[in-house]
């Protein structure tokens, strides 16, 4: 049985810029087979939008809360988002 595709938006706060966080997010998303994008925000947080199966999303969320070694995650805000045209891999935006 194929899992349902969902779309979620994440805003990750803490020490998440300048520590390889976007590369980490991309690596995790690719490992889980998710499509989407990640970008640094001007307020110091990182925003990610992902589209994929529910089980892959659960695993992705757990990894977001752990982060790469030099990051310090203080909070992860998660909202469901409308399905987007994201469907061709995972990219890091400037």
Image: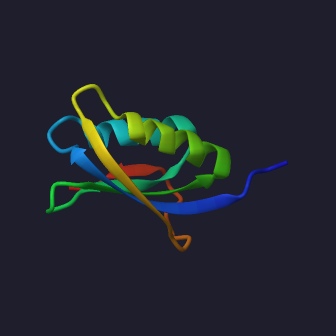
Give coordinates of residue 60: x percent, y percent: 51, 42
Q: Residue at x 52, y 34 (%)?
A: 31
Does residue 22 lie above or below 48 as drawn?
Answer: above
State the quadrant of the C terminus.
bottom left
Residue 63's image quarter? top left
User: For the point 43% across and 49% down, which residue is it?
Assistant: 90
Q: Which residue is outermost to the right?
A: 1
Q: Residue at x 39, y 33 (%)?
A: 66
Number of disc labels:
0
Q: Position of residue 38 (x, y in %)?
A: 33, 53
User: Residue 19: x and y, percent?
Assistant: 19, 35
Height in image: 17 above or below 42? above
Can residue 59 be seen from the camera position used here? yes
Is residue 38 rendered to the left or right of residue 15? right
* Residue at the farthest bottom position: 82
Q: Is residue 30 left or right of residue 10?
A: right
Q: How is the image coloured?
A: rainbow
Left or right? Give the position of 10 relative to 72: right
- Give the residue displayed 37% in from the left and 52% down from the top: 76
Viewer-closest of 16 and 37: 16
Q: Residue lying farthest top?
A: 69
Residue 55: name its quadrant. Answer: top right
Q: State whether residue 93 appears in this view.
A: no
In this orientation, which residue lies closer to the viewer: 27 or 9? 9
Report x, y in % for residue 6.
Answer: 61, 61
């Amino acid at each position: 049985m194929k899992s349902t595709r969902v779309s979620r938006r994440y805003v990750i706060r803490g020490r998440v810029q300048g520590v390889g966080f976007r590369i980490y997010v991309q690596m995790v998303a690719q490992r889980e087979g998710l499509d989407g994008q990640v970008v640094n925000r001007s307020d110091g947080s990182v925003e990610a939008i992902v589209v994929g199966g529910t089980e892959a999303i659960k695993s992705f969320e757990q990894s977001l809360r752990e982060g790469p070694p030099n990051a310090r995650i203080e909070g992860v805000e998660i909202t469901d988002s409308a399905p987007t045209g994201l469907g061709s891999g995972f990219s890091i935006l400037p």
